[in-house]
Amino acid sequence: MTGEDTRSNKALPALRHLFGCYFHEDWLEDVSTSAEVFEGALAAPDGLWQRVIEKYIISESPARTQAASRELASVLHQATEQELDRMLHDEFGSSYTPGSGNVRSWLQAVQECLERALHNAA
């Protein structure tokens, strides 16, 4: 996904909505309890991203969830790891960085959550 292809990623509205609106700069505050803040559980927020996805699935329509899953599958199929990292932060507006550092693995896990929710809703 180089050159001209990367410019077309601006046409991925469901992913821009998911990552820009739900993984914004204050995403951690949105899904954390005051007890977790007090206990310092937020020092390792890697496991909290699932709460964001749950919030997304509950808040958004199945059609939007399906669109995000479809767009994510396409991006995962076409982009390199480096392109995925750049797209996640620069194009989709996410402020989340996977603790493992492997953006592809994390995005695959996100897609699995979306697909599981769609399957359970059917």
Image: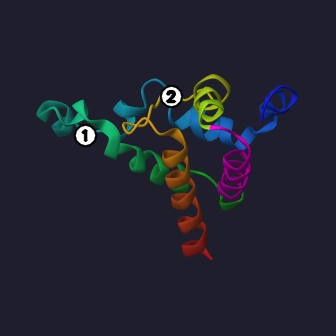
Residue 74 on the magenta segment: yes
Q: Amino acid at mark 1?
A: Thr
Quadrant that contains the C terminus:
bottom right
Residue lying farthest to the left in this orientation:
39
51 in relation to 103, above or below: below
Picture residue at 36% right of the left edge, 36% below the top = 99
Left or right of 100: which side holds 84?
right
Secondary structure at badge 2 equals loop
Mark 1 crowd level (few <14, some 14–19, many ≥20, 10 Å Cα): few
Picture residue at 54% right of the left edge, 67% below the top = 116
Secondary structure at badge 1 equals loop
Left or right of 72: which side holds 48?
left
**Which residue position is annotated with label 1?**
33
**Which residue position is annotated with label 2?**
24
User: Quarter of the image holding residue 115?
Assistant: bottom right
Q: Which residues are magenta?
A: 64-80
Q: Position of residue 52 (x, y in %)?
A: 45, 45
Q: Position of residue 7 (x, y in %)?
A: 82, 26
Q: Main secondary structure of the magenta part?
A: helix
Task: Check residue 93 in the rendering and tell me which mark sits there, or answer none.
Answer: none
Q: Position of residue 25 (x, y in %)?
A: 46, 23
Q: Position of residue 89 (x, y in %)?
A: 58, 26
